[in-house]
C-alpha cells in the first residue's frame, strides 16, 4: 500500500510539472531564428570560395537576461584532400541582455586561401540545447561586386 501511494504521489508530481512546463511554453517560448549572409540583410545559403567572411545572424524571441546563444561551424563534406567529414571548425557563445536580443557570429577564411569547396552547416544553441541548423554550400568561383 505504501509503495502504491509513493507511485501515485510521484505520478501526480510529474503530471503537475508537465502541465506547468506546457503553460510556460504557451506564454512565450524562447526561440532564436538565424540566417547566413556575407553582409547584413542579404540572406543566402551559397557562397563563393573567395568570400572573405560568412556571417550567421540571429534574432531571439522571449529570451531572458543571461541566456546563452551558441554557434558551432561544421564542415560536413569538403572532400578528402581538406580533411575528414563532420569536422568542427569553430564555436562561440554570446550572452543575452534583452528578450528580443539579436546578434551575429562570423567565420573568416584563412588569409591568402580560399574556402574549401563543399557542404557546411551552422548549429545554433540556446542555453546549450540545439535551436536551429542552417546548411550552406561553398562553390568554386569568385565574387563579382556591382556598384
Image (cartoon, rainbow, N blue to C red):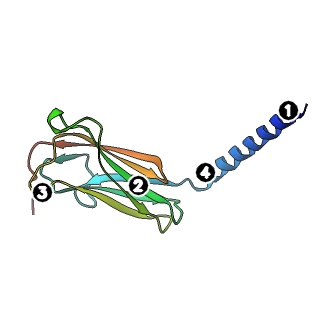
Element class at badge 2: strand
Which numbered dot is residue 3? 1
Give the class, few, some or many, for how many residues have Cα within 10 Å of label 1's Cα (few <14, many ≥20): few
Which numbered dot is residue 111? 3
Left or right: 109 as drawn, with respect to 23: left
Element class at badge 1: helix
Q: Which of disc 4 and disc 1 is earlier in sequence?
A: 1
Q: Residue furthest bottom?
A: 97
Left or right: 80 as drawn, with respect to 61: left
> Which residue is denoted by mark 4 in the rendering?
25
Discs 3, 4 touching: Cβ within 8 Å: no
Rendering coords of residue 89 (x, y %): 27, 47
- Residue at image location 12% in from the left, 51% down from the top: 50
Rendering coords of residue 25 (x, y %): 60, 51
Q: Nearer the viewer, mark 1 or mark 2?
A: 1
Discs 4, 2 touching: Cβ within 8 Å: no
Rendering coords of residue 135 (x, y %): 30, 42
Q: Is residue 111 above or below residue 136?
A: below
Amino acid at each position: 500500500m505504501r509503495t502504491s501511494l509513493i507511485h501515485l504521489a510521484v505520478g501526480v508530481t510529474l503530471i503537475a510539472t508537465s502541465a506547468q512546463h506546457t503553460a510556460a511554453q504557451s506564454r512565450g517560448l524562447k526561440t532564436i531564428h538565424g540566417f547566413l549572409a556575407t553582409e547584413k540583410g542579404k540572406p543566402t545559403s551559397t557562397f563563393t570560395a573567395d568570400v572573405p567572411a560568412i556571417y550567421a545572424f540571429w534574432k531571439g524571441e522571449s529570451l531572458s537576461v543571461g541566456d546563452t546563444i551558441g554557434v558551432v561551424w561544421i564542415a560536413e563534406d569538403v572532400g578528402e584532400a581538406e580533411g575528414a567529414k563532420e569536422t568542427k571548425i569553430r564555436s562561440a557563445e554570446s550572452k543575452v541582455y534583452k528578450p528580443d536580443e539579436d546578434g551575429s557570429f562570423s567565420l573568416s577564411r584563412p588569409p591568402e586561401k580560399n574556402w574549401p569547396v563543399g557542404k557546411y552547416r551552422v548549429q545554433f544553441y540556446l542555453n546549450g540545447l540545439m535551436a536551429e541548423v542552417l546548411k550552406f554550400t561553398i562553390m568554386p568561383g569568385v565574387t563579382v561586386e556591382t556598384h
